[in-house]
Amino acid sequence: MPSVNFKVIWPDGDQVTYYSPSTIVHEHLVAGDKYSQAEFDQRIHSALNAASERVYKKFGYYCTAASAELEKINRKLQFLREQEIAGEVRVTQLS
């Protein structure tokens, strides 16, 4: 199953590359686009959950890597809320 790495620039300036086990992430995120934190949260949950579901359909188990990436993203979004850091999330690369 083809995987995708996607690079994000967070509102606090952090640049992080994340992993998706499926190309379905291309249906949810566009390189170069900016998303509000709430919209990014919704889109990435949909994308990584759908990716994990694709793994389940093909192999019979859910992708723990997708779950781990989602947990990292959840922690980052929580940090931004706690620190009251506003701003958009920019997706710079999907490869």
Image (cartoon, grey):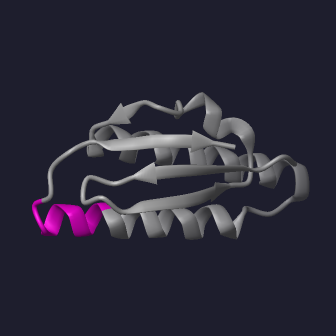
The chief SS type of the magenta part is helix
Tell me residue 39's x, y (percent).
Answer: 33, 37
Tell me residue 9's x, y (percent).
Answer: 39, 51
Tell me residue 81's x, y (percent).
Answer: 17, 61
Residue 80 falls within the magenta-colored stretch: yes
Q: Quadrant of residue 43?
A: top left
Tell me residue 77's x, y (percent).
Answer: 30, 60
Q: Nearer the viewer, residue 95 or 62?
A: 95
Q: Is 9 left or right of 82, judged from the image as shown? A: right
- Write down the region rendered in magenta: 77-84
Q: Residue at x 61, y 29 (%)?
A: 27
Q: Nearer the viewer, residue 9 or 78?
A: 9
Relative to residue 26, is residue 63 depicted above or below? below
Q: Residue at x 57, y 42 (%)?
A: 93
Q: Nearer the viewer, residue 42 or 53?
A: 42
Q: Quadrant of residue 59?
A: bottom right
